[in-house]
Amino acid sequence: MKIGIDIANQSELINIINSEKYRDFLFTKNEIQYTDGFSFNRKLEFLTGRFCTKEAVVKALGIGFLTRKKVTWKDIEILKINNAPTVVLHNNVKYFFTEKGYRNIEVSITHKKETVISVVLIH
């Protein structure tokens, strides 16, 4: 069992969320489309939570983005399934996850004012 934790301030990500280039680099089409129609503050909160969760996943797995394993931000997708954040892995991250014998990823995302914390449990 592995645990990953990440914390971020929404204000640190405002420029990323405002930039289509960076947003498209960090988030999948599904993650971005989900925020269509959200107010800017809600979109910022939602995408900051996804950003933190992706960071927590790589910490729990002990890998890094853009490493020799060729892991990208879009290889970790955080979708809302059954009204809960759910991690969906793609490409090399999925391969690494299954190669290590892991079966489940549990995630909790907490928002407090402008701070977002994500905790990931992999087992």
Image: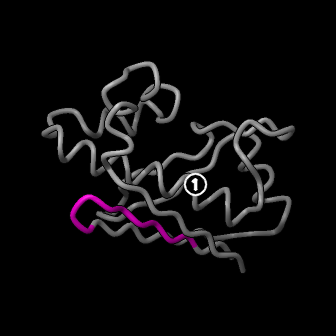
Task: Please tell me which residue is depicted at 31% across the width and 37% down the height of the picture.
Answer: 14
- As drawn, the residue found furthest toward the top would be 21
Would you identify the image quadrant in which residue 71 lies? Answer: top right
Residue at 86%, 38% in the rendered image: 68
Q: Quadrant of residue 37?
A: top left
Q: Residue 99: x, y in percent?
A: 85, 59
**Residue 106 vs residue 39: left or right?**
right
Q: Main secondary structure of the magenta part?
A: strand
Quadrant position of the C terminus in the picture? bottom right
The spot of residue 122 in percent (x, y) is 65, 72
Q: Nearer the viewer, residue 17 or 70?
A: 17
* Bounds of the magenta segment: 112-120
Q: Is residue 97 left or right of residue 100?
A: left
**On screen, 21 above or below 16?**
above
Q: Residue at x 41, y 51 (%)?
A: 79
Relative to 30, residue 85 above or below: below
Residue 35 picture location, percent across and down = 25, 39
Provide the residue designation for mark 1.
55
Local crowd size for mark 1, using a 10 Å CA cut-off: few (<14), some (14–19), many (≥20): many
